[in-house]
Amino acid sequence: MSLNHVDRQILALLQQDASLSTADIADKVGLSQSPCWRRIAKLEQDGYIKGKVALLDEKKLGFDMLVYAHVRLSNHGRTNLAEFERLILSYDEVTECYSMAGTMDFMLRIISKGIEGYEQFVRDNLLNLEFVQEVHSNVTMTCVKRSTALPL
Amino acid sequence: MSLNHVDRQILALLQQDASLSTADIADKVGLSQSPCWRRIAKLEQDGYIKGKVALLDEKKLGFDMLVYAHVRLSNHGRTNLAEFERLILSYDEVTECYSMAGTMDFMLRIISKGIEGYEQFVRDNLLNLEFVQEVHSNVTMTCVKRSTALPL
DNA sequence: GATTTAGAGACATTTTATTTCTTTTTTATT
DNA sequence: AATAAAAAAGAAATAAAATGTCTCTAAATC
């Protein structure tokens, strides 16, 4: 199963604004409502669309501190990766986590309320782990751009 | 205007799944439909909800390369920040861009198709800019976690 | 050129969102 | 503590959108 031009158009629209109605989308891609709806349904079925989410205003909710932290694991951590990853998944402040090529390290995107919030999180949930050897914090200042959209 | 417990519950639900119906949410937070709908409408009005988007499957669409690139600007870049930022906004491959504390640098999240795609993007759109002095690529391997949700 | 098949459109039906009106709860004031 | 005013909740009606069904068209196959 592969995507044609219309499918890609639909995906491009929905990843910018998932509150568009089927009729709106149908209009924009030059289809009538039913076939357009069927395409969207299929795209969801086939897993091209993983889900729909509401994006909230971080600042307004008090999250003014965004840090990318590089974490170096201890030997113990390296032999218990699964356990470390399970922990990471349980921390809501860690919104993203990737293992990085080259090193046996992880990069964490951590969102918190003020420097205080960040420091507390790191102390309580990273530094005191036997898994973690070292944490390097890369603090962001201005957000120039942030999008969840893929370059279709 | 401040948020009560129910408002926060609603936000927490919607940032996980924006396809929930008003009735579903009303159920989960213990309200009836109309007041629940009014709260959601107000949360949007007041800007707590910035928008709703569909999240697509990167892998399935061929985007198997995710890199965080640190960009050091040249003198020329530093005196033309606005112009640099405008350019960054125009690159769909750059899904995020932050200026970093301490240095006069930026961190870019770049998504592309294969190493080839990444290399081409960097060559064509970063290295050949007079703004850019240096690019350090931090290549991600495994995605342990990725979420757009705030820790409410 | 006939036949099959995938996809399109029209329209009916169901579900969900939105509005209106009424009732309850809360808050402030006497 | 009693009462008025304001805010929030609920019920029910209405409007809009999503979903399903059926028919038709156009491309593909034989």
Image: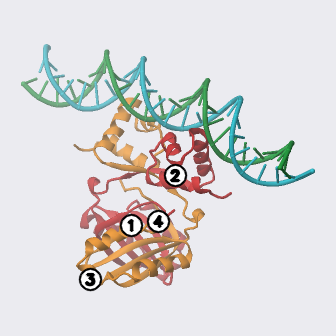
Chain colours: A orange, B red, C cyan, D green
Q: Chain of mark 3?
A: A
In front: B141, or B104?
A: B141
* B141 left or right of A14 in image: left
- What kind of residue is marked 2? Gly
Between disc 2 and disc 1, the foreground one is: 1
Crowding around mark 3 (Cα neighbors within 10 Å: few <14, some 14 to 19, many 20+) is few
Q: CA distance from mark 2 to mark 1?
A: 26 Å
- What kind of residue is marked 3? His
x, y (%) of residue B64?
Answer: 27, 62
Q: CA distance from mark 3 to mark 2?
A: 42 Å
Q: Are marks 1 and 4 on the same chain?
A: no
User: Which residue is tagged 2?
Assistant: B51
Q: Are marks 2 and 4 on the same chain?
A: yes
Q: Secondary structure at mark 2?
A: strand
Q: CA distance from mark 1 to mark 3?
A: 19 Å
x, y (%) of residue B38?
Answer: 61, 43
User: Which residue is tagged 4?
Assistant: B87
User: Which residue is tagged 1?
Assistant: A90
In front: A81, or B103?
A: A81
User: Which residue is tagged 3?
Assistant: A76
Residue at screen point 47% across, 76% down: A121
Q: Chain of mark 4?
A: B
Crowding around mark 1 (Cα neighbors within 10 Å: few <14, some 14 to 19, many 20+) is few
- What kind of residue is marked 4? Leu
Q: Are marks 3 and 4 on the same chain?
A: no
